[in-house]
Image: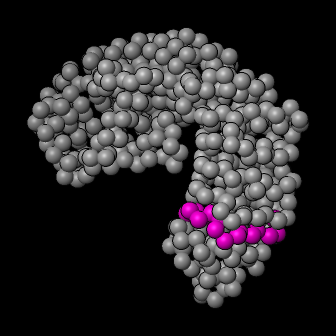
Amino acid sequence: MAEGMICSEDKGRGESLRDVAERYLFELANRCVVEVETDKLPLYNRFKSCRLHDMIRDLCLSKGKKEGYLEVIDKKMGGEESSICKTNRLAIHMEGVDNDLSYRIGENKNIRSFLFVKTDWLDTFLYNYITFGIFKYLKVLVLEGYTFENLKLPKGIEKLKLLKLLSLENSGVEELPPSICKLPCLQTFNVKNTIRLPNYIYKMRHLRHLFLGFLHESVGGEKLKFEGLNELEMITGFNSLVDDITHLLKLPKLRVLEGRIFYEESLPMIVDHILNHQEQFRDVQLNIDMVVNMDSEDGSTLLKRLVMCHSLYYLSIAYCRVSKLPTYEVQLYQNMIELQLVDTRIEEDQMKILEKLPMLRVLGLWSNPYVGREMVCRATGFPQLRELVLHGLLNLMGWRVEKGAMLNLSSLLIAECSKLKMIPDELEFINTFQELRIISMPEEFVKRVGVVDGEGEDYHKIKHIPFIDIYYYD
């Protein structure tokens, strides 16, 4: 998208360029031209990565190099560098310093796209060429996984006036300079793991995709502003402690919201807005932390309204007292794929509610989310569940799984459930099991499993699982 390869004329009603791009990629995957890895959540951003088959990759690299379209330099693979001065797109995978290579790259003033992967001489290269505005036509700059000198971004990036995509993920940059917000054409900005951001992001009027880290803050301490970002479609890493939610919810094209909510007044605002704009939002992922009144009548009502949101795919509730979860109804939990409960201290077994969620694939119960002694997974319950975590259910003594429950379970983690005596009998009949991890469980529990010698009372229940990992601490 950053290089203008996606045609806006192909947009259907209500589609964005990103929708068109995903449609293109899906078609290529159907034709077996590319292999795609999809996210466990079928969301707006459903493709995690894509790769080419070896033969197609070799063909594309050969053709791209011949046409001056792209060049990949990988010293480990013994890649040649004959066409660097002519190529428009360059990816560099190497360690060590190569001054000759740096010089020859600098001779190419027409480069449109740069991808650096753990390149040791990046500081020198950026200073010599980007700082002085050599690459005036650059549209894509990916500097991921590199630790900059003094943890600061070199000056001069703002001179790349045509830049549309800038990724600094895992780059170790602690603070971005205000000048970074002077990039007039920037559409995609990835600053995950950057701590301090200038409070001028609202000046990036063409921004469409903003990837923040949850631990970010604004320089000066004021809440980060988003007013005027009318093209913004996606924001991840939103944090109600440090970001201004008022203007964010007014953005007309916002479709994807991934955020962490702390303030009690923030949650009703978000719920009201999403419910009133159901047709606008495609994917909402919320982490609700330390909202203290979730167990009140108003809190219960608010939680029920939240799970009415059709676009809510992921929900985490942490360190909030919750009296009970909303009873399952057809209009509730419609598309919820993942639910995480952390220290919610629910007193009544909620499995009878959760097992009815038609789309639930991932369930995590952490640090006393449920304080009861017994837990039952009934027949036909959890039809789509793939991953289950039981971690720190300190009062749990018995867990029963009826025949026909969790028939698609692939991964199970049981950890620090100090009173749990044994694993359920019916796990033996779940044929989709791929992984079982048991961590910090009582000695009696571990002996019953008896994986090492195959002599434990419960070994027959799990012997069909390909990967079993047990950590036991005295």
Q: Residue at x 24, y 31 (%)?
A: 89
Question: Would you identify the image quadrant in which residue 310 lies?
Answer: top right
Look at the picture and state if 397 lies above or below 264.
Answer: below
Location of residue 430 in the rendering, given as x and y in whole percent from the top left corner: 58, 71
Residue 235 in sight here: no
Color style of the picture: one colour
Indicate the quadrant containing the N terminus: top left, top right, bottom left or bottom right.
top left
Location of residue 131 in the rendering, given as x and y in whole percent from the top left corner: 35, 19
Look at the picture and state if 49 lies above or below 133.
Answer: below
Q: Is the magenta stretch mostly helix, strand or loop?
A: loop
Q: Residue at x 39, y 24 (%)?
A: 12
Nearest the eye: 322 or 12? 12
Location of residue 147 in the rendering, given as x and y in whole percent from the top left corner: 45, 37
Q: Is residue 203 left or right of residue 471?
A: left
Q: Identify the residue at the far right of this view.
A: 296
Nearest the eye: 408 or 420? 408
Q: Any magenta on residue 410?
A: yes
Q: Any magenta on residue 256?
A: no
Q: In this view, does 383 lie to the left or right of 23?
A: right
Indicate the quadrant containing the C terminus: top left, top right, bottom left or bottom right.
bottom right
Residues in magenta, as a range:
396-412
Nearest the eye: 281 or 73? 281
